[in-house]
Amino acid sequence: MQLGSENRQLGKNRTFVIMRVQGVIIMDDIKIIGVRDNPEYLERAADYFHSKWGVPRVIYYDSISMSLDTPSPLPRWYLMLKGDEIIGSYGLIVNDFISRQDLWPWLAALYIKKSERGKELGSYLLEHARKEASKLGFPIVYLSTNHVGYYEKYGWKFIAQAYDVDGGDTRIYGASST
């Protein structure tokens, strides 16, 4: 059942039609799903996040499996699918292995498959994360990165420097979820 649609400009002369169908965003043959609403993706999600970030699979598996029925709003894990292939991901979590534990939620593990980059698909994940954070009652969502220039294009503001789990510097960005 279609709940609504909108046209979105992507780059020069490219438009995707976004339709919202039962909480899933569809862009042509691409959709973003929440693993909480699609628990059949648990194993694939754990494998995918582990393969992209090198964090032990058991960490992702435990976090994702516990997120399926927790009364807590976090963590939440999302996959971008093209057909049945996972081509992107992100999570909303309490802390992204950095020193600023006074801030949350964190957008973590944002990833787009290399062959799918350059199509502005990451912007859809960023927008989706902001909307999901808003639905969960969080006015601001944060991320940590050492990339400069990418997140600013999509309205994220540099907030401060912090330290990652190895003691290295990382940049903190925030964006309004509304």
Image (cartoon, rainbow, N blue to C red):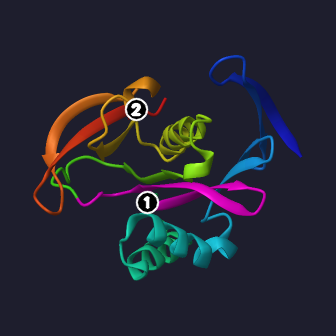
Question: Along the polypeptide, which appears first: circle 1 or circle 2?
Answer: 1
Residue 150 location (% of width, % of height):
40, 32
Residue 27 location (% of width, % of height):
75, 40
Secondary structure under tag 1 reads: loop
Reading the image, the residue beneath label 2 is 150
- Residue 14 in the magenta stretch? The answer is no
The quarter of the picture where residue 86 lies is bottom right
Against 59, residue 126 (above or below) is above
Q: Outermost residue, left direction?
A: 167
Reading the image, the residue beneath label 1 is 74
Task: Estimate how packed mark 1 is, as few (under 14), some (14 to 19) or many (20 or more) residues with alpha carbons within 10 Å.
Answer: many
Q: Amino acid at mark 1?
A: Leu
Q: Amino acid at mark 2?
A: Tyr
Q: Residue at x 41, y 42 (%)?
A: 138
| Alpha carbon separation for disc pair 1 and 2 | 25 Å
Q: In front here: 93 or 156? A: 156
Q: Residue at x 50, y 71 (%)?
A: 64
- Residue 79 in the magenta stretch? The answer is yes
Secondary structure under tag 2 reads: loop
Residue 42 location (% of width, % of height):
60, 75
Residue stretch rendered in magenta on the structure? 75-97
Label 1 or label 2, whichever lies nearer to me, is: 2
Left or right of 136? Residue 171 is left
